[in-house]
Image (spheres, rainbow, N blue to C red):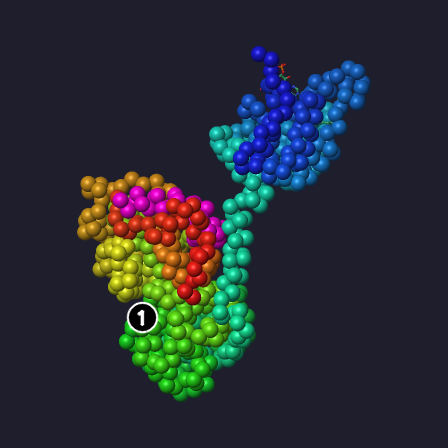
Amino acid sequence: MAKKIGVTMEVGNDGVAVITISNPPVNSLASQIISGLKEKFQDANQRSDVKAIVLTGNGGRFSGGFDINVFQQVHKTGDISLMPEVSVDLVCNLMEDSRKPLVAAVEGLALGGGLELAMACHARVAAPKAQLGLPELTLGIIPGFGGTQRLPRLVGLEKGANMILLSKSISSEEGRKLGLIDELVPPGDLLTTSRKWALDIALLSDTAKALVHVFFAQRATSKVPKVTDVGLKPRPMKKVAVIGGGLMGSGIATALLLSNIRVVLKEINSEYLLKGIKSVEANLKGLVSRGKLTQDKASKAFSLLKGVLDYSEFKDVDMVIEAVIENIQLKQKIFKEIEEVCPPNCILASNTSTIDLNVIGEKTNSKDRIVGAHFFSPAHLMTLLEIVRTENTSAQVILDLMALGKAIKKVPVVVGNCIGFAVNRTFFPYSQAAHMLVNLGVDLFRVDSVITSFGLPLGPFQYISPSCLVVLMLGDLAGHGIGIAVKDIYAKAYGDRMFSSPLTELLLKSGRNGKINGRGYYIYEKGSKPKPDSSVLSVVEESRKLTNIMPGGKPISVSDKEIVEMILFPVVNEACRVLDEGVVIRASDLDVASVLGMSFPSYRGGLLFWADTVGPKYIYERLKRLSETYGGFFKPSRYLEERATKGMLLSEPKSSRSRL
Ligand SMILES: CCCCCCCCCCCCC[C@H](O)CC(=O)SCCNC(=O)CCNC(=O)[C@H](O)C(C)(C)COP(=O)(O)OP(=O)(O)OC[C@H]1O[C@@H](n2cnc3c(N)ncnc32)[C@H](O)[C@@H]1OP(=O)(O)O
């Protein structure tokens, strides 16, 4: 059968034009191939439906280089005009200067002009064991498609010169190591990966879309209807009192001091007060040692701190931030006291992450001044500040706290008052789902590994939601005793969709309280990475016996993708309820909060942006099937069902305004 010679172009639904060289057996660059390439590149650059271009060779070979027969003809005839003009108009103008990204998909071999064409592309994806080289000197010529310039820039001058002067080829594996090849994939994935690369370079990638979304979403958080658009001006916050010098209180105090705000730190006795002051000092020292703060600035900040054991310094404070333990009675007592001792316009804020603010302020007559200032631990480092408003909180107070948040380099996100507010409420199913999977027989270290591969910095068993008091079954980092303390509060509010696992209690009973005492699911030793503690598996087995949810007593078999879905889809589901109840002003606020508060990968755009890329319909159907198998924990929310069935995105604004 006559061999098919030519250059073809196919444009896929993804907008990628695949240009293929066909000239068996080595796809040598004969004159008609070169003219064909010129024509296709011009066409691809002109077509509006083409977003990016992939160049490849037919028959498992990219190209063996320029057609040596032409050289032979020139030798015979002396007619140099037989040499097609290629370097400038093809390689430079049409390829390197292409307005659209151009990726070479290299298989088999790319030699001489073949490799030179590949190097004129913006990136190169190769299959294993491809032969790459510039053997022109074996023909008595030098590389004429720009290879003498591009190869050394890609692999370094020494290696490049060596390859050219010795006509030495390398494999695509070595090319990957040297930077000549950008990604190595199996032959079957070559075109798919090359297309993705081409689109990524075109900045049409999901990653680019996600990060641009987060950029604008973060700026949108400063627009709060009826607060920032009614002509109010924020009042200066020169002196702030922090009640409670524990982990959160000392972190909050540090954040305030770093922005030159005078801080009065109150504790109940001198021992706790000294501890709190030492914690602030340690926070500042830590910043200095990490080069984030000069010693002078640290000393100046520390000089603005005053420790007290009573309210004598409260008479001229602009704001009080309560940061004591999550005890309702204690908080109510404190709020009653500060209402009496503070100026009448002083803002009365609580750092609570769990308790209803209306309950906290129950014994006061200052409902308009009560607000949540929910920091995330470590409070002097984490940038998210949830500003929790009740239906009584005044716009001025919200505006003042937003301004203070910005002044101390936080990203304030205004949210509504419910158990867990926005982030903690949304993410409480995160750890519970992980615990369910482990009780269903899935290896807990695998769960952590899958979730970190998805993009969260730590898995649910090592992770802690940064506010320290967030989700019911906390990871090692916060200490498991805390998680149990808030469990009942969540159970009361969201009991219909919770999974209760004895694993945390069993872990505590076995003397493992997480990083606090060096052992949790992992072993923590100073200076080394946490190591999975295989001895914890006996505790896991005990939990599995108690919950007895493994079908037929046998561990379930799930793929990594299913693990991600079983853990994050319930989180998306709860986010839908948060949207439905108007706890956030807009979906993108929750994206920002998920990224800054839970370290959800920003390159996925935040929780709801990611969910919309997965597709509400798919999420709804998966949760429906999971709820049929595993019960109400996965039951799709009304909002999700509605959006899925109407083909709407989760992030599309509700017709009715949020309750904020
Ligand atoms: C003299 C003119 C003066 C003017 C000079 C001005 C300079 C301006 C230059 C402009 C363009 C320059 C572009 C570039 O820089 C120059 C080049 O690309 S030169 C070519 C570089 N490539 C090579 O040297 C590769 C040579 N080929 C091989 O090494 C091997 O063939 C292979 C590719 C590794 C495959 O090996 P095998 O699988 O063993 O197969 P064979 O070797 O048997 O070959 C099969 C078959 O293909 C023919 N063939 C191979 N390569 C070419 C080729 N590049 N052009 C034409 N034909 C080629 C080979 O002859 C066999 O043919 P068959 O015998 O089956 O008919």
Residue 355 location in percent, x, y?
32, 69
Query: Does residue 595 sit above or below 230 in this rendering?
Result: above
Towards the viewer: 632 or 147? 632
Residue 443 covered by magenta stretch: no
Identify the residue at horizontal 49%, vertical 66% (top origin): 224
Quarter of the image that includes the N terminus = top right
| Residue located at (33% from left, 57% from top) | 428
Residue 389 vs 127, above or below: the answer is below
Is residue 619 magenta-colored?
A: yes
Residues rendered magenta in the picture: 602-628
- Residue 563 coordinates in the image, percent (x, y): 34, 45
Quadrant holding the C terminus: bottom left
Residue 617 seen from this side: yes
Residue 326 figure quarter: bottom left
What is the quadrant of residue 86 in the picture?
top right
- Residue bearing the label numbered 1: 326
Judged from the image, the quadrant occupied by ligand 1 is top right
Q: Residue furthest front?
A: 655
Q: Position of residue 166 (x, y in %)?
A: 66, 29
Helix, strand or loop at mark 1: loop
Is 85 drawn above or below residue 515 in the view shown? above
Identify the residue shown where x is 57% and y is 39%.
Answer: 198
* Rendered position, 298 above or below 432: below
Q: Main secondary structure of the magenta part?
A: helix
